[in-house]
Amino acid sequence: MAKFYGVGTGPGASDLLTVRGKEIIEMVDCLYTPESKKGGKSLALQIVDPYLSEGLTIKQRHFPMVNNWDEKRSAWNEIAEEIIADVKKGLNVAFITLGDPMVYSTYSYLLERMTDKIETETVPGISSFCQISNNLQIPLVIDEESYAVLPATADEKVIRTALEQISTIILMKVSIALPKILEILTDLDLLEQTILVSDSSMESEKIMIGLSDLSEQDQLSYFSTMIVYKNRKLKGSKKDES
Amino acid sequence: MAKFYGVGTGPGASDLLTVRGKEIIEMVDCLYTPESKKGGKSLALQIVDPYLSEGLTIKQRHFPMVNNWDEKRSAWNEIAEEIIADVKKGLNVAFITLGDPMVYSTYSYLLERMTDKIETETVPGISSFCQISNNLQIPLVIDEESYAVLPATADEKVIRTALEQISTIILMKVSIALPKILEILTDLDLLEQTILVSDSSMESEKIMIGLSDLSEQDQLSYFSTMIVYKNRKLKGSKKDES
């Protein structure tokens, strides 16, 4: 029976997809991919490019990144209905989403519009911060440690409490709240315990270890993540050099 | 040049390895795998079984799971030295570890003994809680939400603060601290907001949605994880039925 698959592409490198995700992309009849700006190139589509079969129908669809929820809901409704119609026609359909589908993904809104109408399956992906720690080979957590993942746009009190209580703190989407984050990290003397990575596992990847030289005016890539490693000595940070 | 690779196997299903992890397993000359009890079967090895090449040397090594740190350190030293010797001989060597190598893995201790002596690369894996949320298709986090990952053995105050401040809380290794966790979840009225999964993505997988019927005397598999979803309505929980 035809089915819908949501597949996490991982952070950026094609071979960081799961084997299951790759095999689903190779098998489906139709692939939906998000396009952040109208006419913009889909990063998710570039990631799965090596796995696209001949004769595959690719449907790049626009997801508005705006504060107007009515506009967003109307786009999700439309795309969900189109996918449901494709599956009911007998097509196997996949939707690709960056990182993991269950972590800050618009995919969640699409999925909830489909689960009671067609058969759905969701395949995990590697989150960017997970690839960052593996690439740098600095453990996120060992033994009794804990880690937390927060959007930089979260309530300041929640971010401060996490930084005080939790061993390793991952801050997502830091490009849109940089001044606030730098102020908090300075206050808590954590600048040199922090790693900033933009475009993890992509060709444009940039890594900064210790943030004393970062200014709140600096422009960061949208795909920028910080890892605050309270319990590690970071090689290459100013603390390490001194 | 010969190299050492640490590869995360993911939670249990062979096709939840990354493509990169699979290709490394297929390529290496020698594969080290942990064996929790002497003579015990390695779960990590079962997961990568479809990717083992002919002529591959498999070295199952014992990692003591004891409180005696001297005994553990001595085992890590010995295994690290053996791997270093293999790589220096010109062999490509992999070590496999469950889930992600940077999340609560003994692999961290092995790695720190090797990084300045041979070339090393670490490949991420899907964490069990990540597969659980994808399998159940219940998002870990959306929008401004946050999530935290804690060992059930962590300090009670840290667990309580996380449960109060963070939207979604993942508790690992719950089998060894079940009475404490059930008491905290009861106190905070979160029993029916919690999902318990044992042996995620394996044949023996068990899922419990809402924990009012769980008793502190219940014996759980070592691979048991709880996800406390404070912001979701859980289908199948007692709250949902009422």
Image (cartoon, coloured by chain):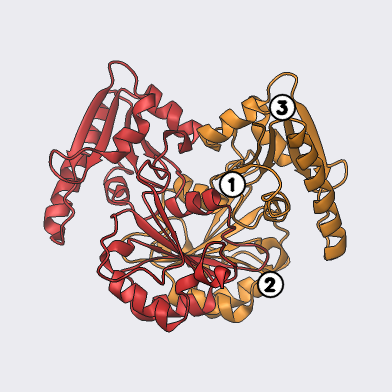
Chain colours: A orange, B red
Which numbered disc, 1 or 3, marks the residue closer to the eye?
A: 3
Q: Foreground: B143 or A87?
A: A87
Q: Which residue is mark 3?
A: A29
Which numbered disc, 2 or 1, marks the residue closer to the eye?
A: 1
Q: Which residue is mark 2?
A: A179
Q: Chain of mark 2?
A: A
Residue A242 in view, yes or no: no
Q: Residue furthest front?
A: B242
Question: Residue B31 appears at what percent x and percent y?
Answer: 29, 30
Amino acid under disc 1: Ser
Q: Tell me which numbered mark, 2 or 3, is placed earlier along the sequence.
A: 3
- Image marks 1 and 3: residues in contact by CB distance under 8 Å: no
Mark 2 Cα within 10 Å, few/some/many (few <14, many 20+)?
A: some
Do dots 1 and 3 share one subunit? yes
Q: Foreground: A135 or B195?
A: B195
Query: Is A83 left, or right, of B87 in this rendering?
Result: right
Query: Is A196 left, or right, of B24 in this rendering?
Result: right
Q: How many marks?
A: 3
Mark 3 Cα within 10 Å, few/some/many (few <14, many 20+)?
A: many
User: At numbered mark 2, what does the secondary structure look like: helix, strand or loop?
Assistant: helix
Residue B14 in view, yes or no: yes
Report how far apart the C-alphas of labels 1 and 3 lie in the structure: 30 Å
User: At numbered mark 3, what does the secondary structure look like: helix, strand or loop?
Assistant: loop
Q: Tell me which numbered mark, 1 or 3, is placed earlier along the sequence.
A: 3
Q: Which residue is mark 1?
A: A200
